Amino acid sequence: MGFLQRPQTTWTRRALFQVHLWTGVAVAAYVCLVGLTGAALVFRPEMQKAAFAEYFEVRRPAGRPDASPGTLVSNLQASYPLHQLLGIDYPTARRATYLSYLMKGNQLVTTFSDPVSGEVIGEMPKKSWITRLQDLHFDLLAGDTGRRVNGIGALALVLMFTTGLVVWWPGIGRWRRALRVDFGKPWPRINWELHGAAGMWLFALLMLWAVTGVEFAFRRQFRQAVNAVMPLTVVQTPQSTPRPGTRLGTDDLPRLIAEARTLAPGARMGRIVMASGPRDPIQLLLAYVDHGDFDTSDEVSLYFDQYSGRLIERRDQALQRMSAGDLVMKWIGPLHLGSFGGVGVKILWSALALSFPLLAITGVIMWWRRVIS
């Protein structure tokens, strides 16, 4: 009862206050960095579209049909004769062009093709200010090492938010008052109340960002932890049966696409994934409504044997059953990025991400006044 009524008098609260204080000081600059870069990267697709508008938007002559798969592939092979085609993404609501992936050695090339003529119109630059910003947010510009450091920073945030919840608790009789900020008080008190109120109002979202940040850095370990609590569904990719003879190639795509449209009437092509290994299938993905959005329940995946061309398996997303763990893993990315809704959600996510530097700055001010001065 002592902590619930008068938490300031308990040893536990005083100890956790020190943990919260010094952890916050240690990661203050990091918190500002991930908050500011994260607020910007919420709009990464929109920034890419604006920066490379010539690749995302093209004029479509009235009445002209889309380029055939054969024409599209022929133009890709003519432009990249030494590359292996990995896959093709069909135009989406956000991108009016075809997006193709090709590999030469260990070099990946991402190209854009005109939807009507099928001509290659350009490559996505491997380096740009957008990729630099993304590398700063996810890897701290230090590759795999930076990503691990980022994961440790995310774990520090989890610790800080957890201890902050204990430190904030003012007692049963005062907790409602502690959720407000009285701007009529002296500025040190405003700073204190703003730090506590902002942290509590946004506690769930801040903890969500921190936990999902851990997942991005330590995917395998995070997945194992989720599986231990909420078992994940193990989905095996269908396999081709190796046999002597020639494998199917890009010349066979028109026939496979025609068969796919027969198997899923009314659905539109969304993606082609070519076989890269000897047992991989050729995958064709179709969507009844929209391909490329967050909702995948309208999608159908068809897997063809890369040697015989026979259909190995059909998967309708609308019929797939997902465990609780599967749902957790599915929502991690969209919730972190704010990509599960429209522009309104992105604006909200971007604005709320600025709470990271707000909490860091107000916390450092309190530390400076309490310890340094």
Image (tube, rainbow, N blue to C red):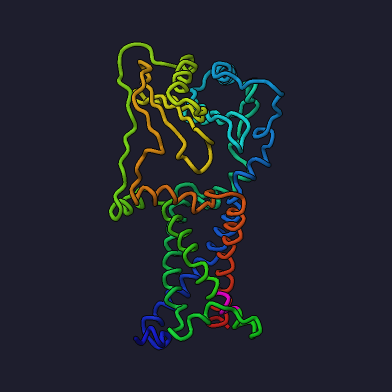
Does residue 289 appear left or right of residue 116 in this picture?
left
Residue 59 found in image quarter: top right
Split into 4 quadrants, where in the image is the C terminus? bottom right
Q: Nearer the viewer, residue 91 or 110?
A: 91
Residue at image x 38%, y 83%? 4
Question: Percent from the top left, x then y, of residue 111?
Answer: 58, 29
**Which secondary structure dominates the residues rendered in magenta?**
helix
Residue at image x 61%, y 54%? 344
Q: Nearer the viewer, residue 183 or 138?
A: 183
Question: Percent from the top left, x then y, of residue 271?
Answer: 49, 29
Question: Percent from the top left, x then y, of residue 325?
Answer: 34, 50
- Residue 368 vertical position relative to residue 218 in the rendered view, above or below: below
| Magenta stretch encompasses residue 237 | no
| Magenta stretch encompasses residue 193 | yes
Residue at image x 32%, y 38%? 235
Split into 4 quadrants, where in the image is the N terminus? bottom left
Count of numbered circles on the image: 0
- Residue 204 vertical position relative to residue 130 in the rendered view, above or below: below
Magenta range is 191-195
Does residue 135 appear left or right of residue 276 in this picture?
right
Residue at image x 62%, y 25%? 115
Q: Nearer the viewer, residue 4 or 268?
A: 268
